Amino acid sequence: MSGRPLVRHPHATGRAYPEEGLIVHSEKGKYHITNAVGGRVWELIDGTRTIEEIAGIIENEYDVSLEQAVSDVEEFVAELRKFEAVL
C-alpha cells in the first residue's frame, strides 16, 4: 500500500452513475467502464486521499470489511494505472 495521495492523470476524466462509472482518457482516445463502486472510487480520487483513506470511505458506504475494501481499491487502482488514468 502507498501512503501517497492518488492523483488523476490530467487527461483522464470520469463520471459515476447509479449502476456504473465511466472513465475517459482523452489523450489516448480510450474509455473504461466500471461498476458503481469503481465509479465512487474514481470520485474519491481527488489528489488528497490515499488508498487507505478511500478504502475507509468504501468500507462505511458499502458495508464491507476494511480489509476487503483495501484489497478492492488496490485492485481497481492497479487497473487505473494500467489504463494510465492515475499517476
Image (cartoon, grey):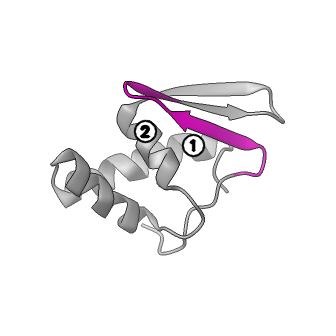
Q: Nearer the viewer, mark 2 or mark 1?
A: 2
Mark 2 — residue? 38
Res. 52 image quadrant: bottom left
Q: What residue is rendered at 15% in x and 55% in y? A: 65
- 4 to 87, vertically: above or below: below
Outermost residue, front direction?
Answer: 18
- Label 2–label 1 contact, CB within 8 A: no
Stretch of the chain drawn in magenta: 9-21
Q: Residues within 10 Å of mark 1 (few under 14, many from 20)?
A: some
Where does the C terminus fall, quadrant-wise? Answer: bottom right
Quick check: 69 left or right of 6? left
Amino acid type at mark 2: Gly
Q: Which residue is mark 1?
A: 80
Between 87 and 62, the one nearer to me in the picture = 62
> In the rendering, at what x and y percent does residue 59 appear?
23, 55
Q: Earlier in the sequence, mark 2 or mark 1?
A: 2
Q: What percent of the width, then of the height, locates residue 55?
A: 33, 58
Q: Is residue 83 visible?
A: no
- Relative depth, front residue between 86 and 18: 18
Which amino acid type is marked by label 1? Leu
**SS at badge 2:** helix
| CA–CA distance in space, label 2 to label 1 | 10 Å
- Residue appearing at x 50%, y 48% in the figure: 43
